Image (spheres, rainbow, N blue to C red):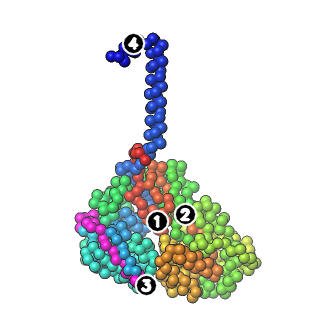
Amino acid sequence: MKLRSLYNSWSRNERLIFWGALMVFIITLVIRTSFYIQDNMTLAPKRGGEFREGIVGQPIFINPAVPGSEADRDLSRLVFSSVTDVAESIKLAEEDKLIYSVRIKENIRWQDGERLTSDDIIFTIQTIQDPGARSPLLASFQGVMAERVSELEVKFILQSPYAFFEEDHLKNLLIIPKHIFADTPVENLKFSVYGLKPVGSGPYKVASYKSDEKGVINIMNLEENSGYFGDKPYIPKLTFKFYRNTSELLNAYNSGQIDGFGLSTAESLVEVGLRHNVYYLPSSRYYAVFINQSAGNEKLKDLKVRKAMDSAVDRTKLANDIFQSHATILYGPTVFTEESNSTIDTSLLNGLELNLTVPEEPFLIKTANSIKSSWESYGARVSIRTLPLKSIQEDILRNTDYELLLFGNIVKEGQDLFAFWHSSRRFYPDQNLALYQNKDVDSELETYRKTFDEQERMNKLEKISNMIASDAPAVFLYSPDYLYIATPNLGGIDKTKVINTASDRFADITKWYVKTKRAFK
């Protein structure tokens, strides 16, 4: 009443001043509140939505122990869990560093409700190690024994210490269910109905797929695994669409049929439309021209000639012209090796006849032609032979039928170069493509993989890289970035993750999101 009497006692001008001041106060309050909210709130991931991924190729048998295609590897990464994922603890026996003891988390279930146990891990190892399975993981687990300790405990016994066993092997060992495949001979695994209806323990499960009258699968629908033991994914539904080649894939993206896809290099990026974010992810792949000194060209045995070949290649031009600079230039098998400052006699290339074998891969063919141009500018004569990748893998490498081979190596995160440069790995199907032999390098490589101190290991890796480069067994070229292209609504991708194989793009899939909400910081 007193406030009303006071208000009534004011003149008209006093009342206008009061209301004006009140309006200013309210507006100021609203503005300051909005600024406060803006400063203290952020967009946070929200569950919901769908993401459509495009892949070149077809799913054949979605099983990580014996995948039939690159699409199988991608889908396996989402449907199955690794030993590291399911482990409650992983302990290394300190006395000899030969035994890794793994304890599995309680109550992890397969997507059909069966319990995941140590028997499943042991069965997975046995399947991989069976030659009849032809598993691509066989070399990684040769000589590794897996023994049952209890229902939830298993121990891995190595023949010699290996510093990267947990990081490179257990992290990538996806477990398959024993109760599904135990009674199926490994030679018949790929005929199983579970090839396209896999039972896994990962964050997603296959809900359905569609194929045409020829049996070609066009679409595969994945949905979140409600019983997943780890962090639940923000995106409850993933739809995979399959294409015959990269051109079809790019057209599908540009027409809005898919929301994301991966590219092994930036070469095709110019064909992508504008509605995208590009993630340039570091890759562990590197490419080189591997020199077979026993191929018959005696001049290739001359270190000065090989160094002249190396010096004549313009790596910066390769990176700029082919990858739009999205590649790391290399002068050795690792980035530790720097460009040599010594004077190289490139006149040694004059009259040199060289034969270069190249896979039928567009960016490698462009690389080969650029190298040919560089060498021929110094008087060399270069013949290029292009062949299908399968032919190179099954025929050319088996018979070491090449003088120079433009090819790539995939080095895992531990950067263990043993498989590519140790003299014991010169024979097919091993991967020492230069047929390189150096007893001192062998010794360093053997010590490197037994070194558990990270700084000591990095120092040794630099030494190894420089020793190999000084022998010029190959012309090291570049490591292209892996590209992931997606519509702007996709978030949550770790931009620092290293891509060893294309399926690694899904390593952080549970953190991806397409929906957001406002939340206080």
Q: Which residue is mark 2?
A: 481
Q: Earlier in the sequence, mark 2 or mark 4?
A: 4
Measured as percent of width and height from the top left, residue 326 is found at 58, 61
Q: Look at the image and say whether residue 251 sits in the magenta stretch.
A: no
Measured in 3D between alpha carbons, the distance from the residue under mark 4 to the one under mark 3, in whole angstroms, is 96 Å
- Magenta part of the protein: which range? 95-114
Q: Which residue is mark 1?
A: 502
Please report the residue visible at 41 percent of the width from the left and 52 percent of the height from the top: 513
Can the viewer see residue 476? no
Measured in 3D between alpha carbons, the distance from the residue under mark 1 to the one under mark 2, in whole angstroms, is 11 Å
Q: Which mark is residue 8?
A: 4
Please report the residue visible at 59 percent of the width from the left and 69 percent of the height from the top: 478
Q: Is residue 365 above or below residue 32?
A: below
For the N terminus, give its image quadrant.
Answer: top left
Can the viewer see residue 480? yes
Find residue 143 and report its image quarter: bottom left
Residue 228 versus residue 386: which sits nearer the camera? 228
Measured in 3D between alpha carbons, the distance from the residue under mark 1 to the one under mark 4, in whole angstroms, is 78 Å
Q: Which residue is mark 3?
A: 160
